[in-house]
Image: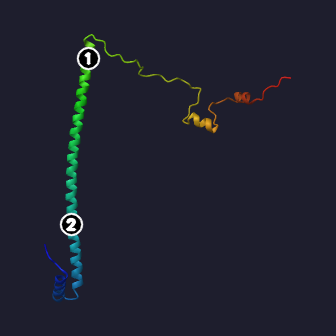
Amino acid sequence: MFDIGVTKLAIVGGIALIVIGPEKLPGLAKTLGTLLGRARRYVADVKEEVNRSIDLEELRKMKDTMETAAQAVETSIQTSADEVQKTWSAATYSGQEAVSLPYYSVHQLPKKRWRTKISATPNWYKARSGTRTKALSGAARVARFRPPKVNP
């Protein structure tokens, strides 16, 4: 584009020194530097915005392809579910024996063990650390640790 070398910059600097003068030249250089920095930042912001819009467009395309794929999977699952429903209803209404499934109760009531103390600590940890797992009354504890009777 522009072929600017060191000699051309020196010539422009010499002419600027003569025309503007040595007192105002540093202020002019500072102003030109700030304007050049602003221009570079503006160009960088524009490039970043363009790249962001391109990435956003790619993401939109990817989103559209994912949505179409999900729609296709949903329709295939729906058609297979409809086919299973039709075969199930055809087998039931035609007098054929339907496939029997094992009987499982929907809800089983929990066993009521209100005397046992249930905690979140696992039993293997209690056994390893020596923690008591059963609550004993005072009389039961005395009976357990009483020395055996000696017969004379």
Q: Amino acid at mark 2?
A: Tyr
Question: Which residue in the structure is indicated by mark 2?
Answer: 42
Q: Residues within 10 Å of mark 2 (few under 14, many from 20)?
A: few
Residue for point 49% across, 24% down: 110
Question: Which residue in the structure is indicated by mark 1?
Answer: 89
Q: Earlier in the sequence, mark 2 or mark 1?
A: 2
Residue for point 27% across, 15% down: 91
The color scheme shown is rainbow
Is 54 on the left-hand or right-hand side of 140? Answer: left
Q: Secondary structure at mark 2?
A: helix
Query: Separation of disc 2 and disc 1 at Cα?
Result: 69 Å
| Residue extending furthest toward the right | 152
Screen quadrant of the C terminus: top right
Is 144 on the left-hand or right-hand side of 123? Answer: right
Q: Amino acid at mark 1?
A: Ser
Residue 119 screen position, x and y as percent: 56, 34
115, 2: nearer the viewer: 2
Q: Residues within 10 Å of mark 1 (few under 14, many from 20)?
A: few
Residue 12 screen position, x and y as percent: 16, 84
Q: Which mark is residue 112?
A: none
Residue for point 78% across, 27% down: 148
73, 36: nearer the viewer: 73
Residue for point 22% across, 38% down: 69
Is residue 37 shown above or below 124?
Answer: below
